[in-house]
Image: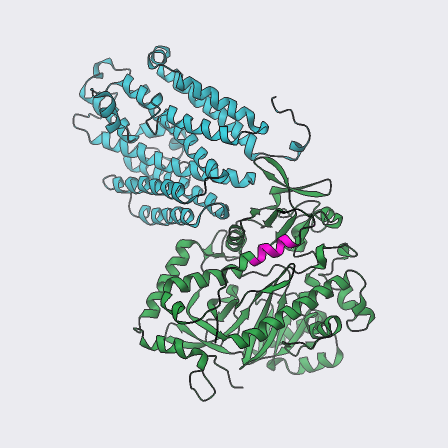
Amino acid sequence: MLSRTAENLYWMARHIERAENTARLLDATYHSLLMPGHNQESPNAPSWEVPLISMGLIEHFYELFTQLTPENILQYLVTSSDNQSSIFSSLAAARENARTVRGAITSEMWESINSTWLEFKDMSDLQLNPSQVGKLFDRVKRRSHVFRGVTVGTALHDEAYHFIRLGSFMERADNTARILDVKYHILLPTIDDIGGAVDYYQWGALLKSVSAFEAYRKIYRDVIDAQKVAELLILRMNMPRSLHACLDEIDGILNIMITLNNYEARRLSGEIHAKLHYGQIKTIIKRGLHEYLSEFINDMALLSTEINRSFFAINHDWFSDRPYFS
Amino acid sequence: MTIHDEMYEKNGVITPLYQNYQKWLAKQDPDLLNKKHREAQLLFARLGITFAVYGDGMGNERSIPFDVIPRLLSQSSWNTVALGCIQRIRALNLFLKDIYHQQEIIQAGIIPAEQIINNSQFRPEMKHIYVAHDIYAHIAGIDIVKVNDNEFYVLEDNLRTPSGSSYMIENRRMMMRLFPELFSKLNIAPVDHYPEILVEGLRAVSPQQVKQPTVVLLTPGSYNSAYFEHAFLAQEMGIELVEGADLFVKNDQVFMKTTEGPQQVDVIYRRIDDDFIDPEAFRADSMLGVPGLLRPIRAGSVTLANAIGTGVADDKSTYVFVPEMIRFYLGEKPILNNVPTFRLTIADDFMYVLANLENLVVKEVQGSGGYGMLIGPQASRDEIDTFRKKIMAHPEKYIAQPTLSLSTCPTLVEKGIAPRHVDLRPYIVSGREVKITPGGLTRVALNEGSLIVNSSQGGGTKDTWIVGE
């Protein structure tokens, strides 16, 4: 398959997944702000800043806005075209990727992505009202579900499909790691709160943001505690948004696509995967969850670069006898 | 000058061809067509069946207005058109081969040498280059107008990168979606298999004797006005849609960059003009093409469809000679008429045209898309004077034709159903044999009285039904 096509498919999927994750993150933040007993004065109060930190956008936000108000945050993360990671920009980019490679996706996939974009434009034209954005987030999530469903249900399971799935899981792994890291970072320092109501709601909101609340209940049948949440979202391979589950997929896909040319991508994913597959939550916590997650995010960035080099950035020199294992 | 409406006989009676359709139409709720029209617009927007409008801001997409009333042609008149088109393309391909090799038609005194040599579309780079199976114009669109019952005229041969075939197919799909009951009632020739004919034709001209030659469609990219069509055709044919940067030339062969490394390309269906196709050979400032592409073409390792230099055969001053070409190369009588055409390089023609501008259509030899035209009967004094000056300065750049009374078809407009002028562009594919898809793209001038059907000039399209007896 054409490198450029593969790259567009990969990014199309990443952008859709990113739109969904941004919606999830904002939705979770929004919900936690509604929780009883939450007090804006407390240093550990859930803040609208959280999604910005998680996405690494806090500095960029303050370049454009002076005040951290819910309205500004929403504008920045939902409808702003100045923010490349806003839901608006993500969906626009996904649509542009899809349009460029229309020939490589099914018409139902294209229709799904195009109408997502048209519908979002219509909806986001409405006033961004913090009390109404919930509906918009739901819509974005649902649309992302539909797109995944249409993809699974209509696309030939060929190389194009693999690149789409690869994009989804690369983005998802990165997002789950970031969400977890930020929550952990912000929440954990106050010992007072641990096991308290605020903590419960905070972790509960986090679980809900990745649709893992019910799964947590099913698996642990216990009060919500940080270590178990971390285990669920990092190591549980049957939890669809956990790092392990994402890496299972990524590693599987790269395993199918392996040629001598992209051996390094496969090796890297195998290494990251192994750490998750054989990891223990005790050890991770002992070492420091934040340190662990930072390393994971770094590893994923390396893998991302390697995927780019192996599949997308083919150049003329490839011809000559390139050393494969350098 | 009476105008022939395709739905009616001269005495105002519905033609036998349209009777079944008209019967159906008469029974419909008057608002139905408007409803279907809105539905079609919505669907086209949702499917993203659009074209970009130049000068209207980058990425500005519009749907081409679509008319829900089909145009009907009988099987017998279609047969005339089809045979005529195939005959023309056979002659034009022989002509192209000839002028890039022996130039017998010039030696025979049928076409003046300067018509070829001085033509900006003539590419000396292609002289004495063998192209697979001697086919130059693999994909052609011939613009045809109907003047009377069974009387057709060719307006123009499009041999470079004719567009619109995707609309032919999408229009049909739309009609089948909107009016499925009509398709079970009438015996309408299918057009959906065009991409199959196309890819089969392209495979047939592969220079390599391989079982599965690699065919790609080369597009200028997603900002091109016809990008939708490029993507559509590539998908329908199951071939890669590539941009210039996806290809490279090495050892006089063309490769595309794939996820598994370079893959050799055998046939390129290009939708980029000659000028931009190879910055090494033609315009150096072009970013769209593939540097060095001319080398593998000359080496015969890749087939470019259409070949470089086909433009010399489809410009409006060469058009004049097509009936002669048919006689010369095929020894046949032309099936389709040319519109009588005045060549301004001929003194008598020049004098006549200058004296009769208000009755003539003047076209730029290299013009397209309905730009650079003068429609005498509809032009103002000033416009005529401006054109007179242009013609006097550069007579070689223009031709002139009498205005034909183009046929009209019933068309849905704001005030209801009204006659509007139409033309027809069938698509002809030359591979192992010359094939034509029944029907083609009917373009309709949506403005009352207008003769200009180009989408860039406010024209729309409608589905064309070849109705079997």
| Colour representing chain B | green
Seen as rendered, the residue at the extreme bottom is B11
Quarter of the figure with residue B324:
bottom right
A199 in the magenta segment? no
Depicted A144 relative to depicted B308: above or below:
above
Query: Which image quarter holds the N terminus of chain B?
Result: bottom right
| Colour representing chain A | cyan
Magenta residues, dominant SS class: helix
Number of numbered discs: 0
Quarter of the figure with residue A173:
top left
Residue B379 in view in this figure: no
Residue B260 in view in this figure: yes
| The one of B361 and A266 positioned closer to us in this rendering | A266
Q: Going by the image, does A35 lie left or right of B468?
A: left
Depicted B430 relative to depicted A160: above or below:
below
Q: How is the image coloured?
A: by chain
B201 in the magenta segment? yes
Seen as rendered, the residue at the extreme left is A36
Depicted B366 relative to depicted A83: above or below:
below
Percent of width and height locating residue A167:
45, 34
| The one of A176 and A201 positioned closer to us in this rendering | A176
Which residues are the magenta region?
A: B197-207
Percent of width and height locating residue A281:
33, 15
Residue at the image position 60 percent from the left and 22 percent from the top? A325
Percent of width and height locating residue B365:
66, 68
